Amino acid sequence: MHDMTALEPRTLLRLLTCGSVDDGKSTLIGRLLFDTDNIPDDQRASLERDSRKFGTDGANIDYALLVDGLEAEREQGITIDVAYRFMATPRRKFIIADTPGHEQYTRNMATGASTAQLAILLVDASQGLLTQTRRHAFIADLLGIRHVVLAVNKIDLIGHDQARFEAIARDFATLATRFHFQTITAIPLSARHGDNVVHRSEAMPWYQGPTLLDHLEAIEPATAQTGPFRFPVQWVSRPDADFRGYAGTVAGGVIRPGDAVVVAASGRTSTIARIVTADGDREVANAGDAITLTLADELDISRGDVLATPDTRPDVAAQFAADLVWMSAAPLLPGRPYVVRIGTASVSGVVSKIRHKVNVNNFDELAADQLTLNEVALVNLALAAPVAFDAYQDNRRTGAFILIDRVTNETVAAGMIRHALRRASNIHTQALTIDRAAREARNGHRPAILWFTGLSGSGKSTIANLLETRLHLLGAHTYLLDGDNIRHGLNRDLGFTDADRVENIRRVGEVAKLFADAGTIVLVSFISPFRAERQMARELVEPGLFHEVFVDTPIEICRQRDPKGLYRKADAGQIRNFTGIDSPYEPPEAPEFHLKTDTTDAETLADHLLASLRPALGLQT
Amino acid sequence: MRITPSAPSSTAASSAAPGPNATDLAALEAESIEIIREAAAGFRNPVMLYSIGKDSSVMLHLAMKAFFPGKPPFPLLHVDTGWKFREMISFRDETARRLGLELIVRTNAEAAARGINPFDQTASTYTTIMKTETLKAALDEFGFDAAFGGARRDEEKSRAKERIFSVRTAAHGWDPKAQRPELWTLFNTRLAPGQSMRVFPLSNWTEADIWNYIAAEAIPVVPLYFAKPRPVVQRGTQWIMVDDDRLPLRPGEVPELRSVRFRTLGCYPLTAAVESTAATLDAVIAEMGASRLSERQGRLIDHDDSAAMEKKKREGYF
């Protein structure tokens, strides 16, 4: 059946196709699959059936239907997500990420590009380079793709004109000078008719270059093999007392038994004892290998640590500059805490500054105080703890990260690290001799943060004041943080936009933490409308110290009370961004205390709170 | 034809590293092992769905490799409809014994007692009750927050768009419009209360990859994949095996011995055999290179309409 002796070992190439519906991108992929005989007979039959029902090419086969996946998409005639397609020839297996070309789908293209080694940029020969071509080239470059095919499609529509093809190829070469592509291969083709896709076209004798398939089979992309050794620890393997191994995938370089390694964060060093696999120990492992390493010394290593060559170490820092692609419908707010997933590590972090955003169509750099869906920006990130990383252009595995929203758990951004921000490493944590335990012993009670959240007029400050009075009478050290002493002083530079509300609560959380560290029982009375910020404040301190008190009062009652006349003004349109009216309030999902002021009076609620809190505070009766 | 899509890789997966000269199978193996380790690290209580077929055999083999010299830190779960081929059940029990793994088996006994079977209900009703509902109940019973499945993106169009880490609602439903972006190998394993994850380590494998890898690694598979004379009846264009005396024969039907094998395995009354003389692995791979039909062609449940799988998945089918 197959002449096995004639075959080289088959290799794998991951590629991405970008272009809009009108460029014939789905048709090109369908054509590739069809002409390489990758479509089974029964799928061919259903393709002919579907072509008559949904096709856009009359009675002819609509190759695009082979790749347009979901029901809704078939009906709308557009591709709306990333689809993966597979193709095999005797020389190569191909994983094709098919991503849509609409502007609003930048996130899909970035997703497909993240794992691709090569990008096919489709242009319509009759249109030449369009704005979207610039966008696609920009994103491919940003995500680290170094090999590009410019597929000049529908060449039949311009009469297979050599001069116009060459003009388009020249235009692209000019555009690409600002990018980092190592190879750019322009190919004139017709997906619909199959010219120069798999079979060489007879209509273009002037074209001597490879067909698309020839090129895809021949290209040898650079790998992380040549870089320094990197190994993010994924799993600590301890099947019994005698074996301690570190499982993971080599992210860069080559490793052999006897090689020296360093744990990037701690700086501890050791040497590789064994490279363990189920198929026996190895003499060498390369970038991309999933292996288990054992070391000559017992070191404290856990998931998230990075083993590296001591000669060329990764950066270890808590602050870095990075390119960011924002992927969520909810905007990025600087200062809001996200989960940063980098390598195998997960840490809390904030975008501390948006340096500028980039218009992906003309590459203009613009000032911004937030990012919306599909926007790209250069930002600074600040993490809660240092992590090990490389620049993305040096290593796509150790230089990439994602941001995850703490509340929705959605993946909201993709990031590519540029460089560490050095000031981070100059701030050393001071080890103090007077610690919190010493202050607790002197005070006679434990500190706490009692975080009162609720609508304006819900009764937060009233109850907080009553509770503070009771605590004071018991001899406790207390302090109340509220709008009056914070908004007018520390935070007087902040307004009421979402971004300012986030920063407001961040500062309040940090101040509360300092007071708690000083041994004080801190009562915080702020509307604090967003779950994510309350969660951040909670995570600033050790578990058990933070108590969320939800003062739950229906907005109609708050409006009737209106102690400061604010609802009247907001309803009259004199105050913008008023919580509960034109700005959202996200009620707590699991507060420690849930107070309903419409059924119980404030004094009783304060008594109940005190009784419940006493054990946690260690207060004598 | 210049191109032979099913031409096997010529070197064994484990003999070459996925460096610059890595074989396609070595690269796929490394990718899958990384995914399996990531799920084991990221979830509190994962489970591996074990369907006994060739894909499950490969997935289980990869899990054994991923945690060597230890064992996979999760049990296997088989949803038994009561209508699986007898050879599948004996292979299942033998595999769990051989590898020393915990095997959980769940059957919807209540529905079986009610008379739910592959003949008196439509294939999709039967599948929903005996497979989908039983699976959901088993996941809830043990509180599994992640379940590995052996699905491949090349099997079917709606699978081509599913993430490797795919979130399910508390009711185990899939929302194809609300999928998280999945970048690099930075998998997002965070879940809200009630949600769970499906993890598909074989997403980027094709049927040909599976067989080539089984050959390269000498992975045991159910003998039903290899041709031998078996008692079958012809229904339309399909050969159905008479695996036991529960298959109601239609008037005039007499089981005959024919040399057949199976490309995909499921409930025997719903799984068509293909006529074949391929009795060895090499013969199966050679036959597949020449085959003109996709493997799902032998699955009766997918034939309702071309969007059948997407609908089933939204309802919680694996």
Image (cartoon, coloured by chain):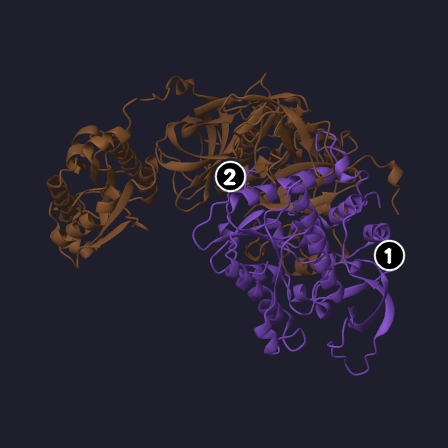
Chain colours: A brown, B purple
Secondary-structure class at tag 1? loop
Foreground residue among A377 and B51: B51
- Image quarter where the C terminus of chain A lies is top left
Residue at horizontal 23 percent and vertical 42 percent from the top: A618
Q: Is residue A100 visible?
A: no
Q: Residue at x 77, y 79 (%)?
A: B249
Q: Position of residue B145 (x, y in %)?
A: 51, 52
List x then y, in percent, for residue B126: 62, 71
**Chain holding disc 2:** A
> Height in image: B3 above or below B133?
above
**Discs 2 and 1 share one subunit:** no
- Place residue B244 in its image quadrant: bottom right
Q: Residues within 10 Å of mark 2 (few under 14, many from 20)?
A: many
* Residue linked to disc 2: A106
**A528 w.r.t. A322: above or below:** below
Which of the two discs, 2 and 1, sits closer to the camera?
1
Give residue B36's position: percent from left, percent from top. 61, 44
Q: Which of the two residues, B303 or A66, is positioned nearer the viewer here?
A: B303
Q: Which residue is mark 1?
A: B278
Q: Is residue B164 left or right of residue A427?
A: right
